[in-house]
Image (cartoon, helix red, strand yellow):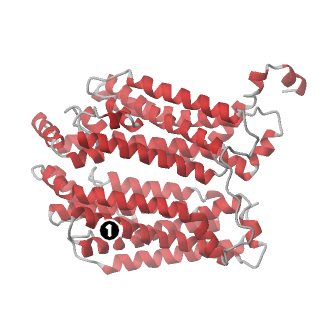
Amino acid sequence: MSAAAYAVRPASARQFAGTGVLLRFALRRDRVMIPIWVGVNALMVLSMPSTLEGLYGTPAERADLVAQMAANSSLRAMIGPVLGDSLGALTAWRVGLYAGALAAVAGLLVVVRHTRDEEESGRQELVASGMVGRRAALTAALLAAAVANGALALLVTAGLAGQGAAGALAFGLGLAGTGMLFATTAAILAQLTESARLARGLTAAVLGAAFVLRAAGDSATVDGSSPLTWASPLGWLTNLRAFADERWWVLGLFAGAVLLQAAVAYALAGRRDLGMSFLPSRPGPAAGRLGSAGALAWRLQRGGVLGWGIGFLLAGLVYGGMAEGAADLVADNESAREIFRRMGGQSGLTDAFLAAMVGILGLVAALYVVASVLRLHGEETSGRAEPVLAGAVGQMRWAAGHLAVAFGGAVLLMLLGGVGLALGHGEQAGPILGACLVQVPAVWAVGGVAVLLYGLVPGAARGAWGVAGAVLLIGWIGPALDAPRAVLNLSPFGHLPKLPGGDMEWPPALILTALATALVAAGLAGLRRRDMVA
């Protein structure tokens, strides 16, 4: 496009000039992340009907499940109310909240990456020096999120159509609406904050608050009618009632919220300078107080560790409080008991449930350690590492500080999760804490893969998210699908003893620890031998 042609275009059109090019660029950059997030989410949803059919194959068994859930407030708080006894309704109940949360996380990551991340790194300033409108980057980011959520909606609708076309469409659109709602929330916070990390953290906090509101509402009612449930977007997903006499008008709530938040984000984007924000960062002290690279790493990551730690403690409390109720819920269902045993070992049902919950905490801790390790990549590519390394700080000391926070933080998270489980369950504090610590070598092994990729092939460092996603998928869905042992063993968590209730086996834990050590050493050796990425 020539400069003359650009100049005669209406001002409103010039605001969005270059959106198509930026969208193609965003989709190219996310050609790995978006398919992984969408694929994992869709597979989790689409695998559930067959699993539920194996667990509750008769109408009587499904009706009994609905009755038991109506009497179990702790499970309603965790999963949501059951609004129908068809396989489609049970699928929407069992995975709806978690699929919606995953869609929300994908949306916020995509939007922040292509807005505030680009400004913070300085790349957006270079792009904006060309014939690009000031709202083009925001539009491209939201469209990229829409592509991801549209693909998820299409896969879910097509995959669940056999359970009922109307319910499948409602469920798919509800998941997409949830993802877009939090994508536009992230768009607003990306304008308000000066840091991409803070924008992601605040959006995640909004998602956490939505989950808490919904949990409080669902624990009080059996049909999602609580005002607290309606105050949460995740509660809207429940009250859409997919496969249970759909409420199509609830989709209007999603559409209205998305349009309103997008309008606010666009208004804010047009009223600030590039790189600036409405909530600027506080200036630091005149004299620095950080005496080492490790102290700097802790200062940069302490907010994340605190947020994850609170989440693990609360999750442990909830899981611990559910232990007896969950055991009672599946006591008469041999198929459900068998799944718990595959996840938690051949022990008493309550111990098997606790072991399964410990395993889930370990899988989530693997996501933390990958995010924390990749902070090294973010510091390097943004140029912030260069001033640090220009002084008397070597690459190894700089990297060691961040890795200490990543791997030490994983231990802290598992301990906090164990404390929460013990407090919620009210007994077995020692065995539960020990079981949580046994998960650490597998968490470290996943973190070691992230270090290896970052050190040897920094351009592929984000592929560690694919590894973590695959491990999460195997550990979460594999037992429900009765996956072969060879598949389960692809995850480091598949080799660990199932505690509490089982027998401790030291060789797998020691081998995984040695493997993690070797991966970290290889990654650091690669980092030492390469130049820093410009």
Closer to us: 527 or 408: 408
Tell me where residue 213 sits by quadrant.
top left
Residue drawn 47% across the image and 65% down it: 446
Q: Residue furthest right?
A: 4
Mark 1 lies on residue: 419
Image quadrant in which the N terminus is located: top right
Is residue 524 among what the camera can see? no
Q: Residue furthest front?
A: 286
Image quadrant in which the C terminus is located: bottom right
Q: Amino acid at mark 1?
A: Val
Closer to us: 476 or 209: 209
Residue 456, horizontal then vertical, whole percent:
64, 67
Tell me where residue 451 sits by quadrant.
bottom right
Is residue 132 among what the camera can see? yes
Horizontal arrangement in the rendering, residue 355 relative to residue 470 (left or right): left
Horizontal arrangement in the rendering, residue 243 relative to residue 328 (left or right): right
Residue 393, horizontal then vertical, whole percent:
72, 77
Residue 232, horizontal then vertical, whole percent:
39, 37
Q: Is residue 228 above or below residue 282?
A: above
Horizontal arrangement in the rendering, residue 430 relative to residue 527 (left or right): left
Q: Is residue 528 above or below residue 458?
A: below
Closer to us: 230 or 85: 230
The number of callouts visible is 1
Residue 307, horizontal then vertical, whole percent:
47, 59
Closer to us: 423 or 165: 423
